[in-house]
Image (tube, rainbow, N blue to C red):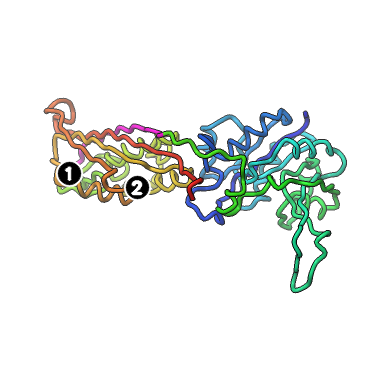
């Protein structure tokens, strides 16, 4: 139908999910959960536009996947919704959570068939068990488990959210603001992913793809007599280091690019620009740790890495094992999965003239397999 916008809320931090992986980044085949849900809604053809809220940390990576409208969310669900509603110019808006991935067409059609009947159409589930509140038994026939998606008159929800009170769903805000709502029977399949155990109840999600994602990184740095050399996270016993904005650890820089390449997250210059003084002389191990944390949050698992260090000088043979130990600890993989190779350029080129070092890095990733938890 026309005159309807979809808002999908995906800016949460997944604090209650009990994993390093954010639930919106769990993979369904090779799609993150948020994209899987958005594509399902898009296929219905009901929506003029689809808006997805995202956290500041996630939004740029989300934009790399597809061409929906992405809005930075806020500290709460309500603040994220308010930010998104600024982009809504249709008469009606459907709001749902990425964490409800198994909405079927029957529920969606039912919601839309009631459009215009009230300010908000709300799906709910009946409560079958006895309910006790503060040691008193409550009439369960009067209890409703409220679900999303909820279909609202745009003007009503915008007005309702101007209140200072915080609400956990749209219909509560609209009713508190003097609006009306209509309840329709929801569905069990519309359960929300809040805790890790909730994944076992969802039948619409395929397991992640088992494909291996590969990336390559390359970096060079010239020598500088005024700095200390760090390579592969290890202090090298020389009287010179690297000319660089950070500590110049060329091996870690190449490795970061390989990891970002495999994940599709861009490159080191985008994530840690040398125009930012926050990274001036920074320990490159800290940059690598930041990247590893992002990879985990975005649903990736590091399989292995392989570094080739091209240096006429210094001789790094005695440092290779320590490099493996340091990097494997940061990457959280077995030491044997961190391979370090060293070579010279037979006195050719800037490396052969002992002007600097170059490093080629390769990294392999896979998707976190949430079906095995």
Tell me, for residue 31, which label it has, or none: none
Which stretch appears magenta?
212-225
Secondary structure at badge 1 equals loop
Q: Nearer the viewer, residue 86 or 34?
A: 34
Q: Is residue 311 above or below residue 16?
A: above
Secondary structure character of the magenta stretch overall: strand
Residue 98 in the image: state x and y as whole percent.
62, 43
Disc 1 and disc 2: Cα gap in Å? 28 Å
> Going 66% across and 44% down the picture, which residue do you hit?
83
Residue 278 in the image: state x and y as whole percent.
39, 48
Q: Does 216 appear in magenta?
A: yes
> Going 72% across and 36% down the picture, which residue do you hit?
88
Q: Label 2: which residue?
A: 331
Image-quadrant location for residue 134: bottom right
Please count the marks in the image: 2
Q: Nearer the viewer, residue 119 or 129?
A: 129
- Which quadrant is home to the N terminus? top right
Q: Is residue 28 left or right of residue 301?
A: right
Looking at the image, tell me whether mark 1 or mark 2 is earlier in sequence order: 1
Q: Label 1: which residue?
A: 240
Q: Is residue 128 left or right of residue 57?
A: right
Q: Is residue 174 above or below residue 115?
A: below
């Amino acid at each position: 139908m026309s005159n309807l916008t979809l808002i999908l809320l995906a800016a949460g931090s997944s604090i209650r999910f009990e994993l390093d992986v954010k639930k919106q980044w769990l993979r369904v085949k090779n799609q993150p959960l948020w994209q899987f849900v958005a594509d399902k809604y898009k296929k219905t053809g009901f929506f003029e536009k689809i808006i997805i809220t995202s956290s500041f940390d996630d939004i740029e990576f989300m934009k790399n996947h597809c061409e929906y409208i992405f809005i930075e969310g806020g500290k709460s669900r309500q603040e994220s919704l308010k930010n998104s509603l600024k982009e809504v110019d249709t008469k009606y808006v459907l709001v749902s959570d990425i964490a409800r991935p198994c909405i079927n067409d029957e529920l969606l059609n039912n919601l839309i068939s009631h459009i215009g009947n009230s300010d908000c159409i709300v799906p709910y589930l009946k409560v079958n068990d006895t309910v006790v509140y503060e040691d008193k038994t409550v009439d369960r026939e009067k209890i409703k488990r409220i679900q999303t998606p909820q279909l609202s008159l745009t003007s009503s929800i915008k007005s309702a959210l101007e209140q200072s009170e915080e609400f956990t769903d749209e219909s509560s805000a609209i009713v508190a603001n003097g609006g009306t709502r209509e309840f329709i029977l929801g569905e069990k399949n519309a359960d929300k992913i809040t805790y890790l155990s909730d994944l076992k109840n969802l039948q619409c999600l395929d397991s992640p793809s088992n494909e291996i994602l590969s990336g390559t990184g390359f970096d060079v740095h010239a020598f500088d007599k005024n700095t200390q050399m760090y390579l592969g996270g290890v202090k090298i016993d020389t009287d010179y280091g690297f000319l660089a904005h950070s500590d110049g650890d060329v091996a870690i820089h190449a490795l970061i690019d390989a990891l970002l390449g495999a994940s599709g997250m861009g490159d080191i210059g985008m994530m840690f620009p040398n125009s930012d003084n926050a990274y001036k002389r920074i320990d490159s191990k800290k940059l690598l740790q930041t990247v590893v944390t992002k990879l985990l949050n975005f649903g990736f698992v590091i399989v292995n890495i392989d570094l080739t260090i091209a240096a006429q000088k210094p001789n790094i043979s005695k440092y290779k094992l320590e490099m493996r130990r340091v990097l494997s600890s940061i990457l959280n993989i077995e030491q044997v999965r961190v391979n370090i190779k060293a070579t010279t350029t037979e006195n050719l080129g800037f490396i052969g003239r002992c002007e600097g070092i170059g490093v080629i890095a390769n990294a392999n990733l896979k998707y976190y397999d949430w079906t095995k938890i």
